[in-house]
Amino acid sequence: MKKLTGLLTAALLIPAAFAADKEYRMYVGTYTRATPDGSKGIYAYKFNATTGALVSEGLVAEYNNPSFITLHPNKKFLYSVSETNAGKVAAFAIDAATGKLTKLNEKLAKGDAPCHVALDRTNKNLIVANYTSGNFTSYPINADGSLGEPTASVQHTGKGPGPRQTSPHAHEGVFSADNKFAMIPDLGLDQVKVYKFDEKKGTYVETAPAVLPPNSGPRHMAFHPSNKYAYVINEIASTVTSFQYNKSNGAFTAMDTLSTLPAGPAVPGNSTAEIMVHPSGKFVYGSNRGHNSIVTYKVDAKTGKLTFVDTTPTEGRTPRNFAIDPTGAFMIVGNQDTNTMNVFKIDPASGKLTKNGALVPQPAPVSIEFVALK
């Protein structure tokens, strides 16, 4: 507790002056847990994209295990899972002045342990991935931002070769740039399931999956800005697989697979979590839980293939999630099990990360999203 108090004091000393065109609010989803420094729900910060400074706005909504959140581009609504057995998903209205959230409504996720939530490209449909039950559910977004009744609930079947793959585990929902396809990485099946998506009906028809090497455990995926390539981070194998993407039919062709860890001794118990492509398209980043680092890759502009650059310690345990700010200048990493966030400056030439200021105290940070304030 003393360490967190000291970090909080340091954070409060950060200047709160923000350039008008670089002012953002950063929301943080968490795991709520019964400890002295435990989280109570969703938190907010002011973020200065010129200096990388974070200033806490405190708890903005009490909610149980809001482990993944997403923001509507109109800046009026936030959506969050409640990662529990018989999980739920909720819609919140945002108070633009204070950042406070007011719950609009809540729906059953129709599955266990919902771990990811995403809007389609029209922002009229919301998809929730349910990890334990291995299915996903889709909801329409009403005009007032609330969630309508589900239009689809799709159950995955099968298993993989590893001890963590005795059943399907849907881990994320991702929509193609043209909104014609939805992708669901499934850790239990070593596949990214691909579905033709009808945005008007909110329905899904399965097509050919992207197949990963056995016992990979695909968790999250990210598209390159060119829409020609996609990258999948594999939780079990601690690897990233690069794919060519055919936008005409939603087909993926594997190119190569690289480790997320540096050469040297094995890192027992490491598992990966988040993957993101830099807005410039020049770099790809992934998080290692166990090694507790962010891996940086350089993207070949002609082929889309990756080259390992280095790993950067996150100075905390279990970086489940990180986010690149909208300007591409900074990365904020949440250290789930040490109750801190770390801000890194991104070198635009090399993609390398440099620590930017003191650790920021935050109970159990596990999902980070930005919204512009101007």
Image (cartoon, rainbow, N blue to C red):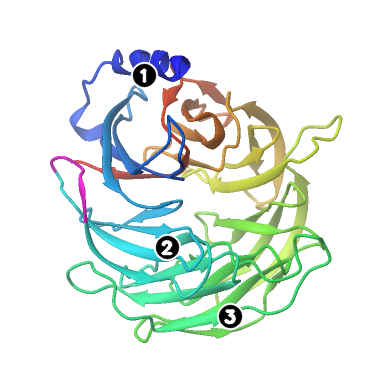
Label 1: few (<14), some (14–19) or many (≥20) C-alpha neighbours in 10 Å: some
Q: Quadrant of residue 185?
A: bottom right
What residue sits right under mark 3 in the picture? 155
**Segment colored magenta:** 97-102
Label 2's element? strand
| Badge number at residue 8 | 1
Kindly check if marks 2 and 1 are in contact, taking CB atoms under 8 A apart as contact: no
Label 3 – label 2 distance at C-alpha: 18 Å
Three-letter amino acid code at the position of disc 3:
Gln
Question: As drawn, is 18 to the left or to the right of 346?
Answer: left
**On screen, residue 297 above or below 89:** above
Neighbours of disc 3 within 10 Å: few (<14), some (14-19), many (20+): some
Which of the marked residues, 3 or 2, is nearer the chain's N terminus? 2
Q: Which residue is mark 2?
A: 118
Q: Give the position of the N terminus as an image quadrant.
A: top left
Do the residues under discs 3 and 1 have CB atoms within 8 angstroms? no
The residues tagged by marks 3 and 1 sit, at their Cα atoms, a distance apart of 44 Å
In the picture, measured across the screen, residue 350 lies left or right of residue 161, that is left
Residue at point 64%, 32% (across, down):
293
Q: Nearer the viewer, residue 98 or 374?
A: 98
How far apart marks 2 and 1 lie (CA) works out to: 31 Å
Q: Position of residue 247 (x, y in %)?
A: 55, 72
